[in-house]
Every structure is written in structure tokens, then in C-alpha cells.
Amino acid sequence: MDLPTRLSYLFGTEEYVGVRRQLVLLREKLLNHLHRMEKENLHSTCSGSLGEGVAYPTSDDDLMLYRTDNRVVKTYREITQRGDVLMVPSEDFPGYCLLLDVQGSLRENSIQIIHEMPFVSSSFFKSVILSGDRESIHGPCISGNVGSWEYDHACCISCSFWPDVANDWLTRKRSNNWPLSGMIQNIVQNGCHVVPVGDPDSPSGQHEWRLSFSVAERTLMHSFNHTQFLVYNLLRLTLKRIMEKSFPGVLCSYFMKTMLFYTAEKTPLHLWRENNLESCFKTCLSVLYDYVDNIYCPNYFIPEYNMMKRKINHTNRHGMMDIIRTVYDIGIVGILHLSGESHCLNDTLSATDMEYKLDREFMFSYHLWHAFMSVDDVFHSLPHEAVVSYTDCLSTFWRILSECTQNELMNMMWYRGIHSHCLRIIDSLLILQKNNKQKYRLYKTLNPLLPIGFRGDVTTGKLTMATYMYMVGETESALYVIQKLLSEYPPYAIDDSGDELKRRTYIEVMCGRGFSIDYKIRSSYVSSYYLDSRCLNVFPYPLRFFISIMGRHFIDPLTYTFFLQSICFVQLRDQSLLRKSTKCLVNHIHELKYGIHIAYAKVCVGIIKYVQGDYQSACRWLGSVYIIADNFPPPYNKRFSRSVLTYVSCLVHKHFSSEILQNQNQ
């Protein structure tokens, strides 16, 4: 296997990189469609490495957020709406500016008076939008984390024009015809943004804003061929694994991207081919060497702005040049050894191994997860009174999908959308008391869609159909769907938080075997089953009360499968099968790893005991949840504790609540 193919094992094949980028565009379109549905004057743009189609385990979710009723204008004449602010470019610090609030339309606590003029302060602006102790300011971004997921959200302001300071980029000579003239025109039409961060050397640095060309950079990155993409990832690997060890925080990925842009502009496209990969990489290293030697890295759009200022000095300059020379001499193979990625050079690596690795990375990637969540949000946010517009929403979803994805991935996203669509229809259907005409229309819409949602993935479509059957009184049909789910897939295939070894063994059957992408996702990607308070009426009543307090949260799919099976047996009054199903759920608790999943599983057992009428056992199980929840990080500890106590006081006889206090004291 040649070197470019082995590098694709690390960074992604051309096909997978294309799919990642399609998912980025799909998520962005769905987020902005959601903003319009909820009548929010917001626009989201996916940026950073995830936005460029780069997949690293440590990649943050970078989003640029700006209000559509707030923009930067160039002259007083262009001020047409209340949220417009006037740009005052900095003469001494290229790429930075002040924003004059001419109309006094922004919040007073984000305004700084400079020379008796009201300017929008970048530092004040960030402090206003900072929410709680879980978030912090990181450059122009608000950073935080939800579990293992880290995010950087840049709350910026859109610039309706192309700034004069970047006009050189439009007019400079390009002998190699990159970027193409049509791409340049498209970039100029989209304008740029200003982000809340100033130059540290400026006396007004705390209140200045920096010009950001993130959208233009993403467009340029998406135009790269696969060789250029591999070179960019090699440059990032060199930075993260080699240079950062000796000089942490001096260089950043943005420098590597800028260097690649300049190199791509100055070299013919025919040189960027896979059999010339080593030469292309070393050409970029030579450019980086010159930047460090001269202590000058010009911004790609504003060459007067030296991005290495304050980063490199005469103390660290020679050491960094030595590392670059060493990396140049050892070449790509040496870099892979130094960075700890030499396993991809193993002679035993087969095409199947590579496909398995990429399949697994893709099916558990943030790209796919974010796309799924965006699909769910679009349909869950529909108000109940908009039932008649469900079909229109589905048509809009199909249009957005067809604009972004042109391969097998479209099927998977379509199934997911149908599943979310069915949840909202079921929710509306089950709360209708009268209006037979409206009920008939909903039934007519739901009946052909439910079987399509059934094919969504391993769990979600089947569990939704089984839940619906149970809710409308077709208990035996619900059990048939559950039995079909359990017979087609082993328990560890449905469980996304249990035995990792068994789960990995099952995935190996699906990954790297020549199946289509949507089949692989459908057969091996296990998404947690969401209990969403926005679709409260879809779920069985005993669980519904708990969801109403917890809000939107997730449950382990196998836990919910056993729970649904058990309450079906309660409905049929089959004590033998009920004991067997409940025992399966109890045994499953011992295989769970995460506290949140264990808590939900114990809640489900407590609900089953309550439905049976065994209030004392219900209290014991719910009391054990109360103890577990106390160790959860906020705000989950308070939500779970309050939910359990409320549940017990409302649904179980009050004199049993003392047992919870005894369990807590023990």
C-alpha cells in the first residue's frame, strides 16, 4: 500500500472527507432553518477544523454566531436598520477596527465612550454574552464543554462589504489560476465578519474588533484536492506532535493554513498530486522556515498584518528553525515515527483494516452526531398548532438534504428525518381530543411514514413504532416489533454503553465489508434514544412524568427496549414473561458503565414496580437513584434529585418517601 493511501488511513479518504464536508453544510443549513422557524434573528456558520472536514479526536465544535439584524457598514449612508454599526478601521494595526454605535441601538453595558463617541467594546460584548461558570473567554470565543464535548462559539457581527484593507487580495496577480475568479467573486459577495478581540499592542485593544475571513477560508479549504488536504493534515500533525513539545503555544494551525494558501497560490495545480506528496510537503516546510527566519507570517487576506508578531523572537527563533530543518530532512515517514503514528506504515495493514478504521471513526464522529441532532431539532421545534405544515416542513428538509448530500448518506439522513417527523405527528395525534378531520389527516400522513422510519437505524425507528403501538393499545403488535428488534440484533449491538469488547466485535462485522455507507450506519450506529419533553405525549405515561421534569435527555436504547417490553407484559398481565423481562433489565444494569445510564435504568425498574403496584420496591429503586444522582455534575444532580423526589411524592404513597431518606443516610 503506497504512502498517500496510508495517510488516508489517518486523515480520511477523499470520499470520507467529502462526506464530512457535506455533513457540515447540512448541519449549517438545518441550524439556520431552525433559527427561521423559531423566528430568531440568528445565523450560524460552522468553522474551524470540523467545518473544514478535518477529523481529530480533540477537535472543538467551532461555530460563528451573529444576528441578522445587526451588521457592520462602511459609510453613514449605508445605515438602514437599527442594528447597524459603523466601521472605523485602525490606521496603525491592519486588520483591526472600532465599531461606532451611531444609533445607540446596542446594550449600554457593551458600550465604551472613546473621545466622547459610543463604541461597541469587544471585551464588554463578550462579558455580556458569557453565561455561568461553565463558560470562559478564549480569544474571540466563548468556550465551554458539555461532558466530553468542547465548543468554541464566536459571537460576531457580519460585515456587509469587503473591507478596503483586504483589496490587495482581490487584485494581486495569480499566475496559477487559484483561487478561480468565480470563487473570488463568491467570497467577496459573502463579505466577512468582525470578532470581539483586539490587538494587544493597541492602546484601544480591549475595545477593538478583528476582521475574520473564516467563511472565505472554509470555501478555499473545500476547494483543495486530496493531496492538498493530506499536506495540511501533515502540517498540523507536525505542529501538534513535534513542535508543540519544545515550543508550546508559539505556532497554531492557522499559521499552517495560511502558509498552505500562499503555497497553493504560487505553485501550479498539476504539482499537487499524490505521487508528488513528499515534494509538496517539503515546499510548505520551506515557506514555514522562511516565515520563522524572518519572524514574519503575512495574513493571507491582509499581508500587512504580521501574525507572528509577539509569537516568535530571537530567543526561540533558532530552536524552531532547527526543528523545521530536522522535519524537512527526515521527511513524511520520519514524522509519522516521531509523532507516534508509525502504525499506519505497518506492512500488515490491509485495505479492509483501513476501511474498518475509517468506518468506525465516521460512524462515531461529531460530524454525524451533530447532523443527527440538527435533523431532530428541526422537527421537534414545530409548534402543535403547525400540524398542517408538517408536510411542508418535510419537503423543505428534503430540499436542504438534496442541496448538501448527493450520495448514499442522503438515505440515512432522510430516514432520520422521517423518524423525527413521525415523533412530532404521533405527539400531536395523541393530544387531539376531538377534530376528527384533523385526526384523519394525521393518520393518513403517519401510516406510510412509520415503516420508513422503522428502517432508520438499529434502534430509533423500531422503538418509536413499538412505543406508538403500545400507546394506541396494540400491545401485541408492540411486542412483535420489540421481539423483531431483539432477534435481529444481539443485545450488545443495541447497547451503546455496555460491553465495549462485544460491541467492537459486532461493529467489525459491519465495518470494512463493502456495505454501503447508509447500511453501515443503520446496522451499527447506535444513537441514544432521546426522551424529549417537546414530544412528551409519545412516551408511556409513567415515564412521561419523569421526562417533563428532566427536559430533553437520553436513555440507553437497550434499557428502553426492556422497559417497553416489561410494561407491555404488565398490560397483558403476563406475570411470567414480566418477571423474565424485568430480570433482563436488572441484569443489564450491571453491564452499564456510565452513571447517567445506570440512573435511568433504575428509574425504569422503579416505574415497572410502581405499575405493578409494588410501591415499596419502587421506593427502594428510586431511592438508589437519588443516591447515584447526588454524585452527578451540575445541573444533572439537581434535576435527578428533584425528579426522583417529585416522582415519589406524586405517584407513590407519601409514607414511603421516608425510605428514600433512610437510603440516603445509609
Image: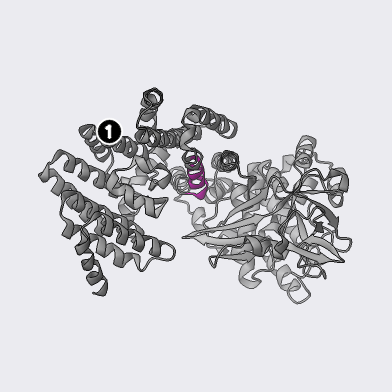
Answer yes or no: is residue 383 visible. Answer: yes
Q: Amino acid at mark 1?
A: Val
Predominant secondary structure, magenta span: helix
Quadrant housing residue 335: bottom right
Q: Residue at x 40, y 44 (%)?
A: 525
In this rendered view, identify the residue nearer to me: 469 or 344. 469
Q: Residue at x 29, y 47 (%)?
A: 560
In this rendered view, identify the residue nearer to me: 223 or 396. 396
How many dots with numbers? Answer: 1
From this view, report whether residue 523 is shown above or below residue 347: above
> Is residue 501 covered in magenta?
no
Residue 113's spot in the image, x, y percent? 81, 66
Residue 490's spot in the image, x, y percent? 27, 44
Q: Which residue is mark 1?
A: 472
- Segment tinted magenta in the rendering: 365-375
Viewed as shown, does residue 557 lie left or right of 171? left
| Quadrant that contains the C terminus | bottom left
Quadrant housing residue 124: bottom right
From this view, report whether residue 607 is shown above or below residue 186: below
Colour scheme in the image?
one colour
Residue 612's spot in the image, x, y percent? 16, 49
Q: Residue furthest right?
A: 91
In this rendered view, identify the residue nearer to me: 307 or 243. 307
Q: Residue furthest left?
A: 576
> Is residue 366 covered in magenta?
yes
Residue 524's spot in the image, x, y percent? 37, 42
Q: Residue at x 58, y 35 (%)?
A: 404
From this view, report whether residue 247 is shown above or below residue 490: below
Element under disc 1: loop
Q: Residue furthest front?
A: 434
